[in-house]
Image (tube, rainbow, N blue to C red):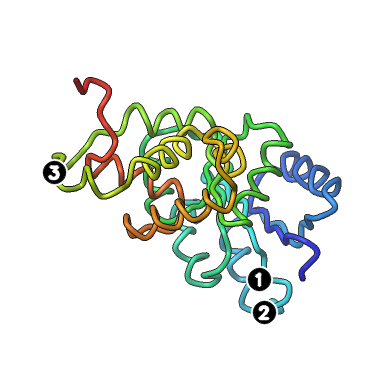
Amino acid sequence: MKSHIRVMLVEDHPEYREAIELALKKESAMELTSQFGTAERALLSLKDGLPHMQPDVILLDLNLPGMDGLDAIPCFNSALPDTKIIILTQSDREADVLKAITLGASGYLLKSATLKQITEGIRNVYHGGASLDASIAKFILTTLKTKLHKGDTEQMLTDREMEVLTLLAEGLVKKEIAERLSISSTTVVTHVSHIYEKLNVTNAPSAIDKAYRMGIFPTENAD
């Protein structure tokens, strides 16, 4: 079994890169294997990189010189289909959040997050979960508007699956959901798998987004 979660950092501010590097050095199960100031250099490095050095998780800034982070997501997904991407940015703009989630980012954290929250986010996405900044999770829940009327979609998810999805949208991880619902973590994993399968998505942010667009989540003003 692999002993370290390999992390690539794509961030153009040296001081912030240094802070992340120091934080990861304190984590025995994580290793910062590479860091780059531009997405182009990061992508170029993958062409000549050894397979065993490929990252498990990429921390990706959005506001980068040259190719921005949003444009880089599909390139990283193509080059590293099994690698998870966490957006780590100052931007909480609606358009950036929605596009990153739509493109398949497994997490969206603001740079105001603590270093502990960032390392926990890395751990969460590596183990198949998601990592959303609390304000981003709230934004997704309260501001996305449904684009489809409710119909048969109401019955797409079971009541328990709806409870699990709602707690995911609040930013809870699987262990916390298990504790909240008084069920085992294994049961939560099973529910999450069924949710992803039914909604045809691969991560929690996409599931939350699609649930809103399909009208599965009630709107704020619903009776």
Task: Specify the quadrant of the image occupied by residue 121.
Answer: top right
Give residue 202's quadrant in the image. bottom left
Q: Secondary structure at mark 3?
A: loop
Where's residue 29, x and y in %?
80, 55
Left or right relative to 73: residue 6:
right
Q: Amino acid at mark 3?
A: Gly
Is 192 left or right of 83, judged from the image as shown? Answer: left
Mark 2 vs mark 1, CA separation in Å: 6 Å
User: Residue drawn 54% across and 38% down?
Assistant: 177
The answer to whether residue 89 is seen in the rendering is no
Q: Report the side of 190 relative to 199 (left or right).
A: right
Real-space Cα distance between discs 2 and 3? 51 Å
Crowdedness near tag 3: few (<14), some (14–19) or many (≥20) residues, C-alpha within 10 Å: few
Counting residues from the start of the chain, the first of labels 1 and 3 encountered is 1
Question: For the residue marked with disc 1, what is the amino acid?
Answer: Ser
Cα distance in 3D space between marks 1 and 3? 48 Å
Q: Where 104 sits versus 89, above or below? A: below
Give the residue pinned by disc 1: 45
What residue lies at 47% left-to-right and 40% top-to-bottom? 168
Query: Which callout, 2 or 3, points at the residue further toward the start of the chain?
Result: 2
Residues tagged 1 and 3 counted as in contact (Cβ below 8 A) = no
Under tag 2, what secondary structure?
helix
Q: Quadrant of the C terminus?
A: top left
- Residue at the location (30% across, 44% down)? 211
Disc 2: which residue: 48
Q: Residue at x 53, y 51 (%)?
A: 187
Q: Position of residue 52 (x, y in %)?
A: 73, 76
Frontmost residue, 40 versus 52: 52
Q: Amino acid at mark 2?
A: Asp
Instruction: Name the residue that disc number 3 marks.
Output: 151
